Amino acid sequence: MKYSVAIVGGGIIGSSAAYFLARTGNDVSVAVIEKDSSYSNATTSQGAGGVRQQFSVEENIAQSTFSLDFYKQWKTHMADVPGLSDLKFREQGYLFVVTAEGEDTLLRNEALQRSMGVRTIVMDRKELCRKFPSIDRQDIVQSVYTPDDGWIDPKAGLWGFRQAAEHHGTAYINGQATSMDTTKTKVIGVNLQDGRKIEADYVINCAGPWVNDIAKMTGTALPIAPMCRLQHFWECPHGFEDLPLVKDESGMFFRPEGSGFAGGRPSFDIKPGFVEDIDSGFLGNYFKDTVSPMLATLVPKFKDLRLQRSWGGHYAQNLLDGNVIIGTYSEGHDNLLTACGFSGHGVMHAPAVGRALSELVLHGGYQTLDLTRFGYDRVKRNEPLRETGIK
Ligand SMILES: Cc1cc2nc3c(=O)[nH]c(=O)nc-3n(C[C@H](O)[C@H](O)[C@H](O)COP(=O)(O)OP(=O)(O)OC[C@H]3O[C@@H](n4cnc5c(N)ncnc54)[C@H](O)[C@@H]3O)c2cc1C
């Protein structure tokens, strides 16, 4: 079969790209190759779904602003899609809290966000305790609250993009990409494990934490590694005000979820790579010994929390700088693109990245938001473009 575009990996990024290509491209045929349509191991199924505009790199703020608005207008954009998944968007805001050490960076970032039109509310410790009385840690000196932010159900986002892409004619092909056919300057097709060949004018590598399996097929290595991140769900018998997604400088975060709260803190002892069997004893002990005391210091009512469930998921960590790599990446193959290495930001940037990939394919360059600084060139130059402050 021959398509205009073949996308390897139908998670939220591949499916968003397929949606924007299929919706906007005239006479563009799109195929998405996905090895596991249950998405049980895909990063998108493991994520927290947070969507925030609190960043320090302008392009990240702009991607979030576009994506947040897209998610808020979800039903309008997707009005013609039958049986569309409910995104379960909760507009309950994001709150970053910092100690004296993080104050200057937090305020510098806030000024940039505000200059770009983000609604921000700066609160010192006293104001914070008034607005969110459950949060009460002595060393917090400053906080920034962005009330327009929130979170979605990431699986619903993935399935919504997939349903919409299929509605606009995208073919989802069940199969595992195992190699690529190339000429000196182009990729001409993708070979699947079962022997099928998918020919295409463009190929986009959206394989999430498996992105290097695909990159290797054309002799490239991307600075991306799977990174295991632990999450927990707990309940607490006390009443709470409507809390936002709360994050501190240690990387600890939590947000309301159903009858309780979901969140966690990265275990920095876990090295990059797939962790096949996360020991449930380790998970429980990590929560009991590390996460739970930290939560209880930030929110005293959490002293009485009851852990219900812990799990691990992998995201694609960009080891260079924690930000996306987008565009061409394989020396000599100008029709092979990627969007990878989102670290913890892929769900919140999926609409902006899907649109950007569609522009690169349909127009040969960015038409709306210029993401050139997030291209592979910075990898070649070894020039990281990092976030500062809370990541
Ligand atoms: C614990 C945790 C919390 C997170 N919290 C947030 C958050 O709050 N906000 C946020 O924005 N992001 C968050 N993220 C990150 C976010 O979930 C990811 O950035 C995003 O889901 C990446 O989507 P993706 O489509 O690139 O990857 P995936 O969802 O992993 O999709 C890649 C797909 O490629 C397929 N594939 C791989 N290899 C092949 C092959 N050879 N052939 C065919 N198919 C293949 C896989 O089966 C998979 O379905 C979090 C992640 C984790 C783990």
Image (cartoon, rainbow, N blue to C red):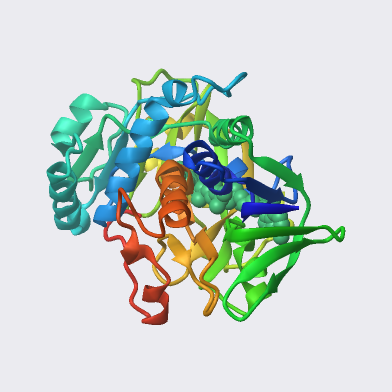
Q: Left or right of 216: which side holds 133?
A: left
> How many dots with numbers?
0
Visible in this render: residue 344? yes
Identity of the residue drawn at 59% across and 33% down: 168
Q: Left or right of 44: which side holds 387?
A: left
Please provide percent x and percent y for residue 297: 36, 42
Along the line of sight, the residue nearer the viewer: 102 or 79: 79
Q: Height in image: 361 above or below 96?
A: below
Q: Quadrant of the C terminus?
A: bottom left
Q: Height in image: 59 above or below 149?
A: below
Kindly indicate the quadrant of the structure image that contains residue 45.
top right
Please provide percent x and percent y for residue 37: 73, 42
Q: Left or right of 238: which side holds 332?
A: right
Q: Left or right of 103: which side holds 251?
A: right
Please provide percent x and percent y for residue 103: 17, 53
Visible in this render: residue 287? no
Question: Farthest residue in the front direction?
Answer: 27
Along the line of sight, the residue nearer the viewer: 2 or 225: 2
Question: Farthest residue in the right direction?
Answer: 194
Identity of the residue drawn at 44% across and 41% down: 351
Q: Height in image: 341 above or below 313?
A: below
Identity of the residue drawn at 28% across and 47% down: 62
Identity of the residue drawn at 22% across and 52% down: 99
Along the line of sight, the residue nearer the viewer: 73 or 244: 73
Please provide percent x and percent y for residue 223: 51, 73
